[in-house]
Amino acid sequence: MSDRVVETAKPWAEVARSIEFVPTRYAVRDQPESVAREMLRCDSTGIDELVDAGLPYELKSGVRHFDPNDLYNLGMYSKSSRTQPELTFRMLFRFADRPVDPLLKPKTWAMRVRLECPECTEVAPWRFEAPDVVRFGGRVDDAVAPEASTGSAEFSATVTTTGARTPLVSTELRRLTRDYLDAGYRWQMVPVAMQADYELVHSLGATSCIAASLFLAEQFRAAGYRAEAKRGWFCGVLGGALDLPHACVEVIDDDGAVKTVDIAKAQLAARLSANTAQFQELCLGSIYNKVIPSTASGNAPFGYHDCASPKAVQVYSDIRPAR
């Protein structure tokens, strides 16, 4: 018998009250109402109910536009079992309630990353925070680094990841991790720039992978451990077509080994099913083959362009299982 909880759909006004909307200074309200209706599988009346309940929007040419993070969170917590975010979440974590042994085997990914520099007018070198898998038993083959150019460039490689059971042995690290998991923060999609402001995220009762990792790394350091939040890629999402920001904590444990604490994935798996206990434990110190770590720190971008453009480089990842 499945341990999944059968949930009843909430009225949209109740859903709106159950989440925190992205503050205006971080919001990018660029999704038209037609997209909102499609994501949430509702009609204009449902959107009206959400707006009346506080969903922020901007009017552009007479059409209401919304922040995609707000729409994703509304869908994820609607309990309707119909919205795009709910269906994506279930597909994304369908592996988490299965035996974890397949996550410990070598897996090869075809990785392409496009870098785009807005308002760029000059040829300049690119700097890219590349995959950092060799330290964890992985391999990078056929890497093609971005060359100096104007406006855009690309990184590509064949990346092999692997997994290993290396659970946390420090009772203090486990206590700090458990305290965070038990704090009751609600996972939400949050803009990357806002995630770096983890005090704000937590003040809203929310959490995210970058915010959680930055906070937990600080807690580990305060307890006397060497720790750093690191960014990477969560692989195989929607066939590689969805670019999800990901972060975890690397910490040197009492046994002298570097351990990886993927706190956000443990939180998300706990929402899915009671059968995910093995995967949740894997997230507390071990590595698994669906994550590609990078050389970027937890709140740093993946790419830079040494030109005069004031805009941040936009990064779009496409990571698919290699054939």
Image (cartoon, helix red, strand yellow):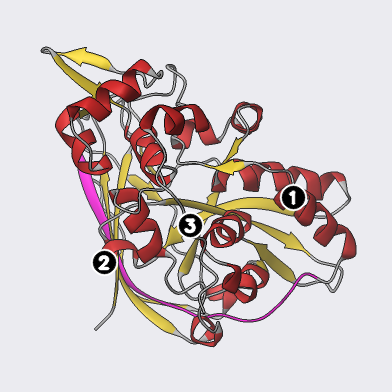
Q: Which residue is mark 3?
A: 232
Q: Earlier in the sequence, mark 2 or mark 3?
A: 3
Q: CA distance from mark 3 to mark 1?
A: 25 Å
Residue 168 image point, x, y percent: 77, 69
What residue type is disc 3 on? Gly
Q: Nearer the viewer, residue 138 or 242?
A: 242
Rendered image quadrant of residue 322: bottom left
Q: Nearer the viewer, residue 152 or 60?
A: 60
Residue sitting at x 32%, y 35%:
68
Residue sitting at x 85%, y 74%:
255
Q: Which residues are magenta?
A: 150-168
Q: Which residue is mark 2?
A: 239
What residue type is disc 2 on? Gly
Q: CA distance from mark 1 to mark 2?
A: 33 Å
Q: CA distance from mark 2 to mark 3?
A: 17 Å
Rendered image quadrant of residue 317: bottom left
Residue 189 image point, x, y percent: 45, 41
Residue 260 image point, x, y percent: 66, 64
- Does the magenta segment cover residue 278? no
Q: Is residue 119 visible?
A: no
Dot in front, 2 or 3: 2
Residue sitting at x 39%, y 45%:
9
Q: Which residue is mark 1?
A: 182
Q: Nearer the viewer, residue 117 or 80?
A: 80
Name the mark on residue 271.
none
